[in-house]
């Protein structure tokens, strides 16, 4: 191999192996074929494993684009012959060769004079056929050209196979990500779609940051790998919810359904007990020998029973109001304690109207979770970091766990789980925080709260900016560039 050709092969090998993008490699392969063979044009036909046909995946030259729809049946044309036999060929009189498939020339208007054609193989498997067409300056292809072209075909085959493997790994990983998100959301169906929406919003905000020419983020630019890293972190930011007990995860009201049923049954029992006590007192009056004031006593018993029944109904109604996650009553704790201090006779002694656990749950000022339950929910962020840290991320994605770990941190240190302050929170996490809060506020499928409008959500985020909790510059980009419109759908309030 001549020194110049050897240098060309070295350059081409480096070029082919510098990318794992399938389309880039195919284009570079064709360009390499024309350079090595000093040809006017080149083409790469790949095998369609479903039909057994060859199709022009890439064609380089003046009329290259026109042959994109041409397909060769198995064994058809010179390329089909090479595919069937696995042997490279030189044909210096294409027009006189009975194997020549003229439809490609007819489709492109190109006139093929001669060609060199070699199978593209990897690990003993034929992937397609590489062609160099029309030696420049009316020249012909020589035997040495064929040897060089076979060597190029091997290099191209390995590069294509590497790209295919990389693409398969990417598809496998994307499938794992999708399955993970589905697993998370199957445990908490009320947040279905939340992770994907947060990812969409955060990536959109990152693209906006890339275009900024002034302000604190003018020098920040996320490349394609970093955008992918942000997307994975955002899609998986709630992955740790798999470590949270499901009854806490989906708790819609302050009391669990079983607790509310127990209180209802308890009050029904108290009512029935009062009714039985009243009937016993009436029976005593009926059996008494003295008949004076009997009717008056019976009426008094009925009035007392009605009054107690009304009091019990009022207590139970108050408990139901306290059970709502939205704050509807001011300081209900005192009234709840008064109710809890009341006792009713049970089979094993006196029992309180409300237990300590029930009073504690009903006294939660806002939301549906007690302090301990909220701590368990907040642990999902640490679970996320721990789970994601077990994944062997590539170098370009190594920050995914850390970005997801910080999405509930606030600039003033009031966030969780680590109470980080501004300089210790990655910009990617700060962007995600804004998008996560916005989606949580505007989504309408959560049973413990009503959706708010976009305007109200933006106002809330503004209040968070004023309190020093979220990034002011990023919020201005989010609101000013209307990033939130990226996920506006029919399950969202926009007015």
Image (cartoon, helix red, strand yellow):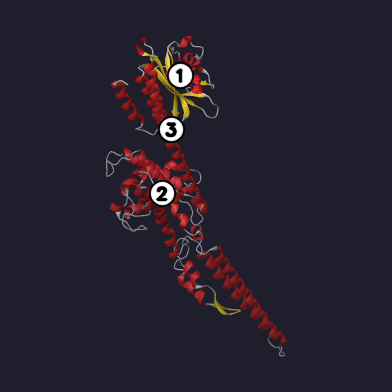
Q: Say whether disc 3 or disc 1 marks the residue closer to the N-terminus.
A: 1
Residue 391 disc label: 2
Answer with left or right where residue 290 lies relative to residue 395. right
The number of numbered badges drawn on the structure is: 3
Picture coordinates of residue 25, whole percent (x, y): 39, 29
Cβ–Cβ under 8 Å for marks 2 and 3: no
Distance between the Cα atoms at labels 2 and 3?
25 Å
Tell me if residue 479 can be seen. no
Q: Residues within 10 Å of mark 2 (few under 14, many from 20)?
A: few
SS at mark 1? helix
Specify the quadrant of the image occupied by residue 36. top left
Picture coordinates of residue 158, whole percent (x, y): 41, 31
Tell me if residue 78 can be seen. yes
Q: Residues within 10 Å of mark 3 (few under 14, many from 20)?
A: some
Q: Is residue 205 above or below residue 89?
A: below
Q: Which image quadrant: the N terminus?
A: top left
Distance between the Cα atoms at labels 1 and 2?
45 Å
Q: Which residue is mark 3?
A: 161
Q: Say whether disc 1 or disc 2 marks the residue closer to the N-terminus.
A: 1
SS at mark 2? loop
Q: Is residue 360 above or below residue 148?
A: below
Tag in front: 2 or 3: 3
Q: Which residue is mark 1?
A: 66
């Amino acid at each position: 191999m001549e020194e110049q050709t050897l240098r060309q092969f070295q350059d081409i090998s480096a070029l082919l192996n510098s990318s794992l993008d399938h389309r880039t490699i195919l284009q570079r392969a064709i360009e390499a074929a024309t350079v090595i063979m000093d040809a006017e044009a080149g083409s790469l036909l790949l095998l369609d494993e479903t039909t057994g046909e060859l199709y022009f995946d890439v064609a380089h030259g003046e009329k290259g684009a026109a042959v994109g729809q041409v397909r060769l049946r198995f064994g058809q044309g010179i390329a089909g012959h090479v595919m069937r036999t696995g042997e490279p060929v030189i044909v210096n009189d294409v027009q006189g060769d009975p194997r020549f498939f003229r439809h490609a020339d007819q489709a492109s208007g190109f006139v093929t004079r001669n060609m060199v054609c070699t199978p593209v193989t990897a690990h003993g498997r034929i992937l397609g056929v590489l062609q160099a067409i029309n030696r420049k300056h009316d020249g012909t292809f020589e035997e040495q050209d064929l040897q060089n072209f076979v060597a190029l075909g091997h290099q191209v085959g390995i590069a294509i196979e590497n790209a295919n493997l990389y693409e398969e790994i990417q598809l496998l990983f994307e499938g794992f990500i999708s399955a993970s998100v589905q697993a998370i959301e199957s445990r908490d169906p009320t947040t279905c779609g939340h992770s994907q929406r947060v990812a969409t919003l955060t990536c959109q905000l990152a693209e906006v940051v890339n275009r900024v020419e002034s302000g604190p983020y003018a020098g920040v630019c996320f490349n394609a790998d970093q955008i992918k890293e942000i997307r994975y972190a955002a899609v998986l930011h709630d992955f740790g919810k798999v470590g949270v007990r499901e009854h806490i995860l989906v708790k819609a009201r302050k009391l669990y359904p079983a607790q509310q049923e127990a209180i209802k049954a308890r009050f029904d029992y108290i009512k029935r007990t009062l009714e039985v006590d009243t009937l016993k007192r009436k029976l005593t009056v009926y059996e008494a020998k003295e008949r004076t004031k009997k009717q008056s006593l019976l009426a008094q018993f009925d009035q007392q029973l009605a009054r107690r029944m009304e009091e019990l109904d009022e207590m139970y109604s108050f408990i139901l109001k306290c059970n709502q996650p939205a704050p509807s009553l001011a300081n209900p704790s005192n009234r709840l304690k008064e109710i809890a201090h009341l006792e009713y006779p049970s089979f094993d002694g006196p029992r309180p109207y409300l237990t300590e656990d029930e009073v504690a749950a009903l006294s939660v000022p806002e939301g549906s979770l007690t302090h301990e339950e909220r701590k368990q929910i907040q642990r999902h962020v640490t679970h996320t970091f721990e789970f994601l840290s077990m994944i062997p991320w590539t170098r370009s994605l190594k920050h995914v766990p850390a970005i997801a770990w910080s999405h509930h941190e606030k600039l003033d240190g009031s966030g969780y789980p680590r109470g980080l302050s501004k300089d210790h929170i990655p910009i990617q996490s700060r962007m995600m925080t804004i998008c996560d809060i916005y989606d949580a506020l505007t989504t309408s499928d959560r049973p413990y709260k009503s959706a708010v409008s976009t305007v109200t959500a933006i106002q809330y985020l503004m209040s968070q900016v004023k309190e020093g909790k979220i990034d002011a510059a990023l919020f201005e980009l989010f609101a000013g560039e209307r990033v939130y419109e990226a996920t506006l759908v029919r399950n969202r309030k926009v007015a």
